[in-house]
């Protein structure tokens, strides 16, 4: 069965970040899928470490993919440099490989440094990377307040309960 187009593009985008040694972990739908939830993938959400070197890695890795903030009218000039990341806490972009949400801090104060210990190395879209664990992921999704995220959090918690029962 062929991989859906959005999922393949998200996989290629994830590979770009991994190959550039960007310090990040995956959250959102890709994380839910990595934990075993059946989920259609529309974009890639990452939480990245806020450091000068990591800003540079992200900028250099994504520049060839023409990142552009979602919601801006096409043709508006933006500078793609480390200042854009340094001055943002959530940068929702469109790239040549699909949508990428670059998140410096999840709802409720979840920075890379604060949540790093609540990640697990998993296969996400067939690539090994750090993925936010189910409980903090579900908490973040609920905190967002969006109905689709709350439903996803409920599905994640149900999956987690099934996994826990299977282990005992």
Image: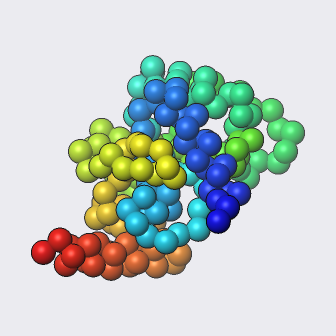
Quarter occupied by the N terminus: bottom right
Quadrant of the frame with the C terminus = bottom left
Residue 37, image x, y percentages:
43, 70
- Work out whether residue 89 or residue 43 is closer to the camera in this orientation and state it: 43
Q: Is residue 108 left or right of residue 151?
A: left
Would residue 42 be visible to someone looking at this image? no
Residue at 49 percent of width and 34 percent of height = 18
Q: How many labels were placed on the picture?
A: 0
Residue 165 seen in this snapshot:
yes
Task: State the image coordinates of residue 51 (x, y, percent, origin top left).
Answer: 41, 25
Q: Residue at x 51, y 78 (%)?
A: 147
Picture residue at 28% right of the left edge, 64% below the top: 135
Above or below residue 128? Residue 65 is above
Q: Is residue 82 above or below residue 65?
A: above
| Residue at the extreme front of the image, as rendered | 1
What residue sits 37% from the left and 44% below the top?
130
Tell me: residue 34, above or below residue 162.
above
Q: Is residue 102 left or right of residue 140?
A: right
Q: Which x, y percent locates residue 141?
A: 42, 66
Q: Nearer the viewer, residue 152 or 142?
A: 152
Tell me, what colour scheme is on the image?
rainbow
Q: In the displayed orientation, state which residue is furthest to the right.
A: 75
Quadrant of the rendered image containing residue 157: bottom left
Residue 158, quarter of picture: bottom left
Q: Position of residue 71 (x, y in %)?
A: 73, 52
Question: Toward the viewer: 3 or 54?
Answer: 3
């Amino acid at each position: 069965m062929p991989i859906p187009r959005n999922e393949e593009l998200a996989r290629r985008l994830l590979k770009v970040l991994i190959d550039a040694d960007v310090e990040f972990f995956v959250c959102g739908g890709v994380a839910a899928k990595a934990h075993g939830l059946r989920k259609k993938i529309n974009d890639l959400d990452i939480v990245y470490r806020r450091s000068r070197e990591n800003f540079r890695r992200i900028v250099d890795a994504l520049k060839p993919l023409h990142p552009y903030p979602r919601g801006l009218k096409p043709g508006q000039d933006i500078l793609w440099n480390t200042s854009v990341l340094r001055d943002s806490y959530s940068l929702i972009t469109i790239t040549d490989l699909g949508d990428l949400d670059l998140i410096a801090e999840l709802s409720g104060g979840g920075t890379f440094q604060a949540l790093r210990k609540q990640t697990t190395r998993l296969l996400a879209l067939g690539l090994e990377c750090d993925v936010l664990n189910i409980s903090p992921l579900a908490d973040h999704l609920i905190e967002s307040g969006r109905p689709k995220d709350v439903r996803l959090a409920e599905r994640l918690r149900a999956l987690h309960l099934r996994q826990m029962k299977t282990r005992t």
